[in-house]
Image (cartoon, helix red, strand yellow):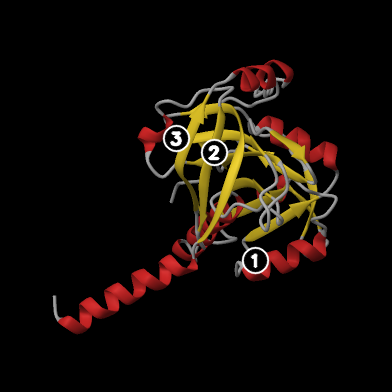
Amino acid sequence: MPRIALFFTILVALLLSACAQRYRVQGLVLDVNRSDNVMIVSHRAIPGYMDAMAMPFRVATPSQLNSVKRGDQVEFQLVVKRLNSLAEKVKAGTSAEVANAQRAAAPLPLPIPAEKLSLGMPVPDFQLINQSARSVRLSDFAGRIIAVNFIYTRCPLPEVCPRLSANFAHLQKRFRQQMGKDLVLLSITLDSQYDNATVLADYAKRWGAGQGWQFLTGDAAEIQRLANQFGLIYWPEDGLLTHTSQTGIIGRDGRLAALIEGSSYE
């Protein structure tokens, strides 16, 4: 490699490294998903970053989860970059204090909603408000392919809601000619009390959303019903929300064609 190319490669690496923020995290492990290299941790407040809450954290090295289990006290370094965040230097262990905490803490319920639709089932119509404060019904897009995800604008972790929005931005760019005519993207907020039409309009602008990508808000009970139908689970934690990630694909016939778990897809 020529010296000048090597110089710029090293410079870029250093700049990217410098952009990362590092935070010390302590908490109690509520669940471990080894297939996705993720642990859900009820953590203490992280000074300068977020309040105490329960959140999923992806580990940098899968082997770090080998000795981690539900109920463990855990400490790690959270490295937050522009596009993702990773847990590094994970240390976990049990003790009498942790055992007491485990007995005192209610287990994290992650039941499958009874209303969850099976693949091939018709998706019931719904009515919400888009970022232009106009009423929108699912039936307005009959005959088109519709992708639906659930986000909220104050989501603090870059690999959750921002990653879901980045995925839709990628789809919008890739299928620019089909947007609105053959393909529609619907992002439904889980935080309808905060994410009104004005907030969503600003968020849509930041992502460069065109006519075929709409951000929806509305009645909290209606959004809860929709989340249940797509198998998404969410709960409030100190003013923010913890949630699973599901993206539903509705076929031209109005039936659920696919349900994508997680936010790491393209």
Crowdedness near tag 1: few (<14), some (14–19) or many (≥20) residues, C-alpha within 10 Å: few
Seen at 65% across and 24% down, the residue is 110
Residue type marked 3: Asp
- Residue 11 appears left or right of 224: left
Camera-side residue: 182 or 98?
98
Looking at the picture, how far across and down is residue 97, in whole percent? 65, 21
Question: In the picture, which quadrant includes the N terminus?
Answer: bottom left
Q: Earlier in the sequence, mark 1 or mark 3?
A: 3
Point out which mark residue 6 bears. Answer: none
Q: Which residue is mark 3?
A: 36
Q: What distance separates the C-alpha of mark 2 from that of mark 1?
A: 45 Å
Which of label 2 and label 1 is nearer to you? Answer: 2
Is residue 62 shown above or below 14?
above
Q: Quadrant of the rendered structure where residue 227 is?
A: top right
Q: Which residue is mark 1?
A: 211
Q: Nearer the viewer, residue 153 or 183?
A: 153
Upstream in the sequence, badge 3 or badge 2? 3
Mark 1–mark 3 distance (CA, rounded to whole Å): 34 Å
The amino acid type, in three-letter code, at marker 1 is Gln
Taking the spot 49% from the left edge, 63% from the top edge, the residue there is 20
Which of the 4 quarters of the picture holds residue 5? bottom left
Helix, strand or loop at label 2? It is strand
Q: Residue furthest front?
A: 96
**Left or right: 181 in relation to 137:** left
The residue located at (68%, 22%) in the rendering is 101
Residue ID for mark 2: 75
